[in-house]
């Protein structure tokens, strides 16, 4: 009876760790997207500023 229980425990552990890893990668992806978005926003602001100076 111990073998099935241990398999269930392993599966539960895998689910928990899998979810944790997925959340970590999701947050990393979100952070990188936010970072890139921030950089592009700064670039557009700089471009707009230079255009204003030219006008």
Image (spheres, helix red, strand yellow):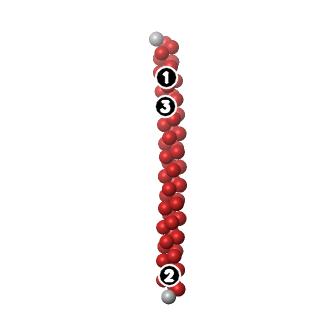
Nearer-N-terminus badge (2/3): 2
Element class at badge 2: helix
Q: Is residue 42 above or below residue 9?
A: above
The residue at 52%/44% (across/down) is 32
Instruction: Name, please, the residue furthest toward the top.
Output: 55
Tag 2 residue: 5
Q: Position of residue 36 (x, y in %)?
A: 51, 38
Nearer-N-terminus badge (1/2): 2
Which of the two discs, 1 and 2, sits closer to the camera? 2
Instruction: Give the spatial CA distance, label 2 vs label 3.
Output: 53 Å
Q: Decide: few, some or many residues near mark 3? Use Cα within 10 Å; few <14, some 14-19, many ≥20.
A: few
Q: Is residue 52 above or below residue 27?
A: above
Tag 3 residue: 41
Asked if the residue under mark 1 is in contact with the one under mark 3, i.e. CB atoms within 8 Å, the reply is: no
Element class at badge 3: helix
Q: Decide: few, some or many residues near mark 1? Use Cα within 10 Å; few <14, some 14-19, many ≥20.
A: few
Nearer-N-terminus badge (3/1): 3
Q: Nearer the viewer, residue 17 or 47?
A: 17
Tag 1 residue: 47
Instruction: Give the spatial CA distance, label 1 vs label 2.
Output: 62 Å
Which of the two discs, 2 and 3, sits closer to the camera? 2
Element class at badge 1: helix
Q: Is residue 9 above or below residue 20?
A: below
Which of the two discs, 3 and 1, sits closer to the camera? 3
The residue at 52%/80% (across/down) is 6
Q: Decide: few, some or many residues near mark 2? Use Cα within 10 Å; few <14, some 14-19, many ≥20.
A: few
Q: Is residue 48 above or below residue 35?
A: above
């Amino acid at each position: 009876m111990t073998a099935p229980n241990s398999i269930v425990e392993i599966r539960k552990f895998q689910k928990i760790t899998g979810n944790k890893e997925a959340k970590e990668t999701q947050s990393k992806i979100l952070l990188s997207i936010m970072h890139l978005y921030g950089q592009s926003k700064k670039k557009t602001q700089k471009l707009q500023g230079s255009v204003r100076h030219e006008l």
